[in-house]
Image (tube, grey):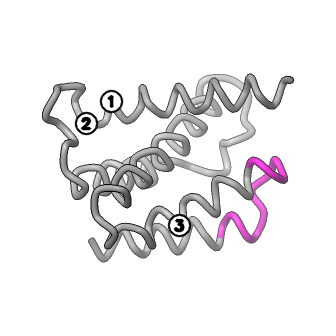
């Protein structure tokens, strides 16, 4: 039950982060490219070493991770060329939720996503 509640909280927060990152206007983030850039911005601002830090720093890292996941997924839906970005972030996000730590697999996928972002 706790895992479900945490999942809902993080997912809802991701939507809020996505809205905040894109300015919250009706046409902001309307293109897949804007969504991809928003995902990359959220990822760039996320320090995965703080994902388990108590307090605001840890919360902020979780929300940025969720925001990157949501925006990358939206970008891939809008334009299939962003699927590699969405897949890398999704693998990192799912692994993190599975093992509740930032292990080597999570780090590998985050590095892959960041490289894709650098090439956008």
Tell me the crowding category of disc 1: few under 14, some 14 to 19, or many 20 or more residues within 10 angstroms, Cα based. some
Counting from the top left corner in percent of width and height, residue 115 is at 43, 75
Residue 11's tag is: none
Give the Cα distance between marks 3 and 2. 21 Å
Quadrant location of the N terminus? top right
Which residue is outermost to the left? 27
Q: Secondary structure at mark 2?
A: loop
Q: Nearer the viewer, mark 3 or mark 1?
A: 3
Which image quadrant for residue 81?
bottom left
Residues tagged 3 and 2 counted as in contact (Cβ below 8 A): no
Counting from the top left corner in percent of width and height, residue 60 is at 54, 32
Give the Cα distance between marks 3 and 1. 21 Å
The span picked out in magenta is: 97-107
Query: In the image, is residue 102 part of the stretch drawn in magenta?
Result: yes
Residue 22's tag is: 2
Query: In the image, is residue 57 part of the stretch drawn in magenta?
Result: no
Query: 14 left or right of 120?
Result: right
Query: 104 left or right of 110?
Result: right
Residue 19's tag is: 1
Residue 87's tag is: 3
Q: Nearer the viewer, mark 3 or mark 2?
A: 3
Residue pictured at 25% horizontal, 55% vertical: 32
Tell me the crowding category of disc 2: few under 14, some 14 to 19, or many 20 or more residues within 10 angstroms, Cα based. many
Query: 18 left or right of 30?
Result: right
Residues tagged 2 and 1 counted as in contact (Cβ below 8 A): yes
Does 40 sit above or below residue 38?
Answer: below
Counting from the top left corner in percent of width and height, residue 113 is at 48, 68
Residue pictured at 73% horizontal, 52% vertical: 96
Residue pictured at 41% horizontal, 31% vertical: 17
């Amino acid at each position: 039950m706790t895992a479900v509640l945490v999942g809902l909280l993080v997912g809802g927060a991701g939507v809020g982060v996505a809205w905040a990152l894109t300015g919250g206007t009706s046409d902001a983030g309307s293109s897949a490219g804007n969504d991809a850039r928003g995902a990359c911005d959220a990822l760039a601002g996320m320090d995965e070493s703080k994902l388990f830090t108590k307090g605001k720093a840890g919360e902020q890292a979780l929300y940025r991770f969720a925001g990157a996941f949501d925006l990358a997924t939206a970008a891939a839906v809008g334009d299939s060329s962003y699927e590699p970005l969405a897949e890398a972030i999704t693998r990192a996000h799912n692994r993190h939720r599975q093992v509740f730590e930032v292990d080597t697999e999570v780090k590998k996928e985050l590095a892959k996503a960041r490289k894709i972002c650098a090439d956008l």
